[in-house]
Image (cartoon, coloured by chain):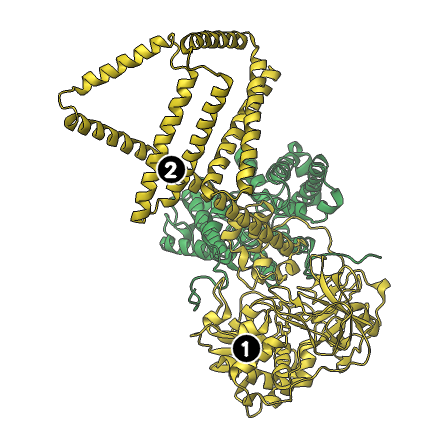
């Protein structure tokens, strides 16, 4: 038998891309469980149907591009996109909404750009924004938490998805929405008058955010990503909220804690901003990238037209990532600034 | 306690060192044949000093260093030179290279060695000479000739001498056992090196995964001023640049040498070889090599003669070829695969790794890069491997260079951690090679451009000089005429004279039946004018000689040329007179007829020309040009053969070139005609 000719290194570390993706999926579990416990089975049905469609669309795209199915489907990246979009969509979304979102994410944002690793924009966020712009009504009606009314069961959830015309579920403005629309009440009074506000940032929301934070910290511990981008984003978001808090007046944008635990903050910080493909690459680059996302999130939430802003902020910064890379190259060993006399 | 610094990145692959540490170093014995590549080091290959059939003794020099950066070669045992030829060697390229092959006689008879001395008794020049003479090349892996590193530029001040006992690559234990078993020699060698470079301090650096080696070194260094520095195990802390940063906190400037920041670094194996060379006069003819991997049943370290085939060692270690799919020289991170177990051990071979497929699996197909950044976290040079990968793949070499491609030390940490199994190092090697090739090409192109521009400039300058001389001559002639007019015939008006001359000319022309001068007159005139020019030129040359002018050479050429022209003109006249005897008597009718005939000839030619198709014209034109070109080339060849002066050759060359261009144009024209 002829000896193999390969170049070094001959040893390889244990981590594979598939494992990275599977760990990310696992890390979303606490958040999904909390969302389900507060808002019912809607999110789970979203995720399940989105995952099914994502794999189907991915297979279709791979077939059209004449790529081996097993090899590329095995990286599980389509599942990650599906789960993130499924979490981001309002619970009890109709099937066609999920279908359009996944099609935009997998076919347009991912495969039209060359597939895994070549997409400049986060696929899940592209799917989300396409839906938000095209179907604002469906996209801004979030289910009430069970503290504010009865939560539908699994059968109702499935009906809501696959027979939307026959389903009439209750919806309610999210705390971010209420905060945005408020121009007359003190923050204190807002809390007193709206059942959807929980202890700090909204019933269900605050716990879901804490659960996603926990999942994110676990990924950090597993060294799936570095702390730089998420911490920068959260820090700047909190800083902006603190600057504009205004002591809870009627013009207030909400407290730092409110912003940290509201909407998609933690999901965004640990599962979207950390998407390596579409973010800046160097340590300094990721700090800048995360910080600017935090800034944009606050600006759009408080001064913009949309109640939440993670998707827009991430997509805008996806544009800027190559530019940030250009100016945040790390200092290479032996280059200027060393004690050398070269 | 010395302050230990950290370097960026690094990885912790499984060490796999225990397997080969079970037994002491074993002598691999003398194989039947040794194959010694002439290039076992960085620099110029050695030059053989022996011939096929020569008997050589152990330690006898068989090849000499070629130039400053090179290393000699010595017979590792006694025997006969069997061949000096190209053999397959251990090189990443898999190419063959010239080798000296020795048939060993098994007697292992030493050549005469100098009497053992203590280095304290020798002066630095002798020490350095002995190291150079012993053919010592860095034994850590790169194989840089040791003497070159130690022969510092005058004025270089060395702060720290580092003896590298890190051995950070997994599997390899050659330096570990060397430090365990020969610590006193290492310390002694370090003192010799310190004597040469006069450092402020001498440090032996060892990773903390070698407690026995550390203990042995500490014991041996007891009472000396040599420090033993222990630092955490992390790959690639044994890389020269990384080790320097760990021990001094300083970074070697990009493109610079450790000596630039006052550091000299030598491997422990090299240090031992230096001691043997200096104190015992023993050249580098053997080394310690680890043989390990699950495809050998008894992984261990061998003291092996340089040139021993790998297969000899593998056999001693219980090699099972059936289990082994790749054979690596070096470690699993930076080693390279060899095409055949028959390739010889060289001075830099620290390890032979024979893994099973389960142990080091074949690389799976690469997936897409997801820019996860694990590579950037692992890179000890603080590069952005994922960006370099894009640039290398997209052939954006300029960007790759801007991202410091050439600071990559090819340690393999990035490929090791890559979850998508991308062979990153391979991309960087290919990109580096390509950039170097492009640079060489660009240099060549630039060279050609400069040559072309210089030539253009020279031609223009010559043209301008000619023009200037022509104007000067004209002025001189006018001046002369003016003076002559003023002094000689003051009453004669120059204008009048010119009119007279013109009238005379006209009359002569009329006499010549309006066709101008007769052929003979022309020829005669040519002879006369040429003679005049020759006289003038000779006069000028004489003045130039007397004044020692710098134009003598040019003037000489001119005189030669004119002389040749005169000879040609005289010959032409002679020929004419032979052909037309008595022409002088009945000049007029002949010229008249001749003129008439010439006119008719010209008209006929024109008519013929007009009747020709463009295609024929083009063909004729090409034929003519090609004939002229052939002639010119023949003249050029003659000129070259005769060793003509450069100027003449150049002139001929340029005319040949011009003709070539015109011929090419004509050919294109012909082709166009044919196509049309």
Q: Point out the tag, 2 or 1, that comes first from the N-terminus.
A: 1
- Above or below: residue B119 compared with residue B491: below
Q: Is residue A83 visible?
A: yes
Q: Secondary structure at mark 2?
A: helix
Which is more toward the observer, B638 or A143? Answer: B638
| Circle number at residue B462 | 2
Residue B523 versus residue B14 in the image, above or below: above
Residue at 42%, 22% (x, y): give it: B523
Could you tell whether B32 is left or right of A122 in the image?
Answer: right
Q: Could you tell me which chain the residue with mark 2 belongs to? A: B
Between A94 and B392, the residue placed more toward the observer is: B392
Chain letter of mark 1 equals B
Q: In the rendered image of this protein, which colour is used for chain A?
A: green
Return the x and y of residue B532 as percentages of the image width and height: 34, 31
Is residue A27 in sight in this rendering?
no
Measured as percent of width and height from the top left, residue A217 is found at 58, 61
Circle nearer the viewer, 2 or 1: 2
Chain identity for the colour yellow used in the image: B
Location of residue B249 with respect to B398 vertically, above or below: below
Of residue B283 and residue A332, the one placed in the foreground of this image is: B283
Residue at 77% from the left image edge and 82% from the top image edge: B109
Q: Which residue is mark 1?
A: B162
Crowd band around label 1 with a 10 angstrom C-alpha radius: few (<14), some (14–19), many (20+): many
Q: Quadrant of residue B611?
A: top right
Q: Residue at x 49, y 40 (%)?
A: B649
The quarter holding residue B83 reads bottom right
């Amino acid at each position: 038998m002829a000896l193999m000719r390969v170049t070094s290194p001959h040893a390889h570390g244990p981590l594979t891309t598939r494992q990275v993706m599977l760990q990310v999926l696992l890390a979303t579990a606490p958040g999904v469980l909390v969302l389900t416990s507060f808002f019912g089975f809607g999110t789970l049905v979203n995720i399940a149907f989105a995952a099914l469609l994502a794999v189907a669309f991915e297979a279709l795209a791979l077939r059209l591009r004449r790529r081996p199915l097993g090899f590329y489907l095995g990286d599980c990246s389509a599942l990650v996109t599906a789960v993130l979009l499924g979490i981001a969509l309002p619970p009890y979304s109709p099937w066609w909404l999920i279908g359009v979102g996944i099609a935009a994410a997998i076919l347009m944002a991912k495969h039209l750009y060359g597939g895994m690793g070549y997409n400049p924009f986060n696929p899940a966020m592209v799917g989300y924004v396409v839906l938000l712009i095209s179907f604002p009504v469906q996209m801004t009606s979030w289910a009430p938490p069970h503290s504010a009314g009865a939560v539908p069961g699994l059968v109702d959830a499935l009906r809501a998805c696959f027979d939307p015309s026959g389903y009439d579920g209750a919806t309610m403005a999210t705390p971010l929405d209420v905060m945005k629309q408020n121009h007359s009440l003190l923050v204190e009074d807002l809390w007193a008058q709206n059942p959807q506000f929980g202890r700090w940032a909204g019933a269900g929301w605050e716990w879901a955010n804490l659960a996603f934070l926990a999942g994110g910290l676990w990924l950090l511990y597993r060294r799936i990503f570095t702390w730089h981008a998420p911490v920068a984003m959260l820090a700047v978001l909190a800083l902006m909220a603190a600057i504009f808090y205004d002591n809870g007046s009627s013009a207030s944008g909400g407290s730092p804690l409110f912003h940290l635990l509201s909407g998609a903050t933690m999901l965004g910080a640990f599962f979207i901003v950390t998407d390596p493909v579409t973010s800046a690459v160097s340590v300094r680059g990721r700090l800048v990238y995360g910080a600017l996302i935090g800034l944009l999130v606050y600006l759009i939430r408080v001064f913009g037209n949309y109640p939440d802003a993670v998707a827009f902020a991430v997509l805008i910064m996806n544009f800027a990532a190559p530019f940030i890379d250009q100016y945040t190259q790390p200092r290479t060993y032996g280059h200027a600034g060393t004690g050398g006399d070269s | 306690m010395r302050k230990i610094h950290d370097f960026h990145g690094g990885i912790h692959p499984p060490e796999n060192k225990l397997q080969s540490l079970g037994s002491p170093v074993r002598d691999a014995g003398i194989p039947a044949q040794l194959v010694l590549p002439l290039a076992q080091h960085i620099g110029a290959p050695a030059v053989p000093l022996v011939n096929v059939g020569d008997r050589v003794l152990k330690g006898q020099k068989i090849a000499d260093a070629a130039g400053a950066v090179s290393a000699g070669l010595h017979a590792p045992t006694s025997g006969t030179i069997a061949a000096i030829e190209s053999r397959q060697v251990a090189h990443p390229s898999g190419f063959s290279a010239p080798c000296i092959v020795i048939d060993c006689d098994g007697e292992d008879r030493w050549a005469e060695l100098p009497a053992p001395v203590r280095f304290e008794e020798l002066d630095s020049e002798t020490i350095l000479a002995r190291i150079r003479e012993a053919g010592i090349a860095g034994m850590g892996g790169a194989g840089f000739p040791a003497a070159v590193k130690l022969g510092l530029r005058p004025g270089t001040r060395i702060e720290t001498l580092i003896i590298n006992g890190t051995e950070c690559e997994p599997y390899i234990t050659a330096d570990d056992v060397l430090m365990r078993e020969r610590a006193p020699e290492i310390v002694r060698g370090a003192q010799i090196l310190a004597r040469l470079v006069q450092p402020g301090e001498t440090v032996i650096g060892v990773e903390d995964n070698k407690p026995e080696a550390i203990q042995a070194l500490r014991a041996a260094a007891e009472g000396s001023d040599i420090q033993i520095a222990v630092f955490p195990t992390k790959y690639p802390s044994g890389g020269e640049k990384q080790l320097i940063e760990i021990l001094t906190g300083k970074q070697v400037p990009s493109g610079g040498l450790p000596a630039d920041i006052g550091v000299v670094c030598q491997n422990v194996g090299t240090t031992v070889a230096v001691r043997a060379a200096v104190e015992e006069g023993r050249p580098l003819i053997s080394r310690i090599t680890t043989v390990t991997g699950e495809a050998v049943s008894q992984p261990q370290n061998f003291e092996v003669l340089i040139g021993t085939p790998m297969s000899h060692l593998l056999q001693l270690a219980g090699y099972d070829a059936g289990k082994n799919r790749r054979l690596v020289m070096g470690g699993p991170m930076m080693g390279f695969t060899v095409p055949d177990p028959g390739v010889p051990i060289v001075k830099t071979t620290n390890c032979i790794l024979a893994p099973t497929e389960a142990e080091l699996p074949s690389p799976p197909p690469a997936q897409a890069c997801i820019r996860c950044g694990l590579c950037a976290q692992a890179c000890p040079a603080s590069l952005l491997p994922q960006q370099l990968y894009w640039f290398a793949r997209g052939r954006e070499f300029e960007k790759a260079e801007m991202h410091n491609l050439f600071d990559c030390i090819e340690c393999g940490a990035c490929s090791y951690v890559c979850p998508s199994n991308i062979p990153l190092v391979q991309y960087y090697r290919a990109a580096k090679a390509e950039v170097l090739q492009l640079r060489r090409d660009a240099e060549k192109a630039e060279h050609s451009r400069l040559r072309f521009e210089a030539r253009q400039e020279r031609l223009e300058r010559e043209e301008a000089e000619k023009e200037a001389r022509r104007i000067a001559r004209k002025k001189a002639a006018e001046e002369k005429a003016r003076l002559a007019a003023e002094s000689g015939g003051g009453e004669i008006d120059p204008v009048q004279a010119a009119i007279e001359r013109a009238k005379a000319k006209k009359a002569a022309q009329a006499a010549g039946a309006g066709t101008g001068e007769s052929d003979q007159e022309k020829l005669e005139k040519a002879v006369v004018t040429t003679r005049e020019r020759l006289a003038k030129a000779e006069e000028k040359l004489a003045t130039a000689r007397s004044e020692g002018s710098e134009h003598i050479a040019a003037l000489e050429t001119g005189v030669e040329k004119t002389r040749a022209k005169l000879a040609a003109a005289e010959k032409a006249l002679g020929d004419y007179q032979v052909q037309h005897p008595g022409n002088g008597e009945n000049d007029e009718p002949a010229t008249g007829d001749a003129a008439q005939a010439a006119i008719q000839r010209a008209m006929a030619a024109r008519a013929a020309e007009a009747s020709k198709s463009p295609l024929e014209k083009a063909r004729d034109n090409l034929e003519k040009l090609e004939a002229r070109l052939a002639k010119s080339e023949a003249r050029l060849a003659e000129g070259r053969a005769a060793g003509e002066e450069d100027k003449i050759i150049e002139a001929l060359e340029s005319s040949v070139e011009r003709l070539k261009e015109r011929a090419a144009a004509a050919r294109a024209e012909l082709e166009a005609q044919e196509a049309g």
